Amino acid sequence: VLCVCMLTTILGCIFGLKPSCSKDVKTCKGRCFERTFGSCRCDRDCVKLGNCCLDYQEACIQPAHIWTCNKFRCGEKRRPEYHCSCSDDCVENKDCCVNYHAACKGEASWVEEECEDITEPQCPKGFTKSPVLLFSLDGFRAEYLQTWGGLLPVISKLRKCGTYTSSMRPVYPSKTFPNHYSIVTGLYPESHGIIDNKMYDLKRNASFTLRSKEKFNPEWYQGQPIWLTAMYQGLKAGTFFWPGSDVAVDGTFPNLYEKYNNSIPFEERVVTVLRWLQLPEDERPHFYTLYLEEPDSSGHKFGPVSSGVILALQRVDNIVGMLMDGLKQMNLHKCLNIIFISDHGMEAGSCRKTAYLNNYLDNVQDFILVPGPAARLRPNNVPDEYFSFNYEGIIRNLTCIEPNQPFKAYMKQLLPKRFHYANNDRIEPLHFYLNSQWQLARKPFEIKSCTGGFHGSDNRFPSMQVRFV
């Protein structure tokens, strides 16, 4: 035995390995990336040598890719590449994963606790005002929570313990940018200027799309978003994504903000907001926004009634659970006011329910059509022909062409007044109203997709309603 230990020590000196003669170590817990002897290894060479401990992946590799604690991580040694820590000193260092107390200390998670009747905010020391978080889950159709609430324990508990409506009506058109900007300004799209995700400005002869640099031009954004209202009242605002929040509206950005980047993981967004809540009182925002692209992205890809949407809903429910666990761990779950909201619903697309103007008109090459369920038409030659174009002639040629025609053309001032969708030059003079489940394009292949899911329809349609908690 003495000879073996001496040999081990010599080899350790030669190869930089730490001797381990006292016990047969079979785990990587506390040994990650250390060159130590034992019955198995936990350094990076163990994969090549084929002698990794059985828990090498779980204890050493996976923590760099996850944002929560588990039994393998509790008591781990701090690593710079980890997103958060499950080490014994993480509370002191304020970098614990959001479920550290639940996973490592045996405390109940937020969703496991019963509802409490909170009549007054219960805030920890240093919080003289209750912060407000406006949290949007894009494309969360109201029916989702009614149908699949049993699969969404966190959001269902928020509804049970908080205040909610069975549905909330979006503004028209039921699109992402118009609705998000209406939520934070209190204005209809015709008044705040963001009349669609794609639009043309006659006065500036400029076009806006979600992929163009014009999206960051403050000339498009009218009205005062709530983060500016808060700042003008001496409060601070922090926005982790929201349409318009990364634009210098009125020459001003939020105190803290992130430029939109859809590749940033949902977990990172939540953790960043939680870290903002840990800032010193004189630096900490009072108003926050948070935005996730799901379940909208999956709704477009798979359609609203699909396993893809169910998986997306479960994913965002887990993310909301991360937020609530993080707040509980910081003792802010009875202090922070949270508004969970969405911008529009989702309808199932069908190529059989997509109409094409080239089946009705011969001169479709003379104009541009913004396709979809709230289609708009303008001439090719803009700005010169914007007002002089023969819109009414097109309307006459498209009126009562066939029985049960799925669309109707309107001069915008004749649209139903409830749309509040006429008093802005960015709204083209000619507008198409589509029946439920229908879309319109100039000709085939000019619509993004006629399958999966879409939105933008009449804001009274049940499929366009959203949830509010």
Image (cartoon, rainbow, N blue to C red):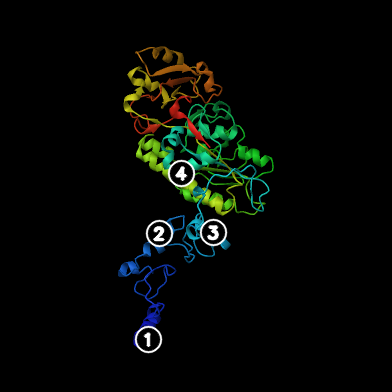
Query: What is the three-letter code of the residue carrying label 1?
Result: Met
Task: Say which label, 3 or 4, has the lower sequence index.
Answer: 3
Task: Say which label, 1 or 3, has the lower sequence index.
Answer: 1
Q: Would you name the residue on which mark 1 appears? A: 6
Task: Say which label, 1 or 4, has the lower sequence index.
Answer: 1
Q: CA distance from mark 2 to mark 1?
A: 35 Å
Q: Would you name the residue on which mark 2 appears? A: 62
Task: Say which label, 2 or 4, has the lower sequence index.
Answer: 2
Q: CA distance from mark 1 to mark 3?
A: 41 Å
Judge left or right: residue 234 versus residue 156: right
Q: Would you name the residue on which mark 4 appears? A: 153
Q: Determine whether the residue tagged by mark 4 lies in a helix, strand or loop.
A: helix
Q: Determine whether the residue tagged by mark 3 lies in a helix, strand or loop.
A: loop
Q: Determine whether the residue tagged by mark 1 lies in a helix, strand or loop.
A: helix
Q: CA distance from mark 3 to mark 4?
A: 26 Å
Q: Are marks 3 and 2 in contact (CB under 8 Å)?
A: no
Give the numbered dot on residue 95: 3
Q: Nearer the viewer, mark 1 or mark 4?
A: 4
Query: What is the three-letter code of the residue carrying label 3?
Result: Asp
Task: Say which label, 2 or 1, has the lower sequence index.
Answer: 1
Query: What is the three-letter code of the residue carrying label 2?
Result: Gln
Most distant residue in the bottom direction: 2
Q: Position of residue 123 (x, y in %)?
A: 64, 49
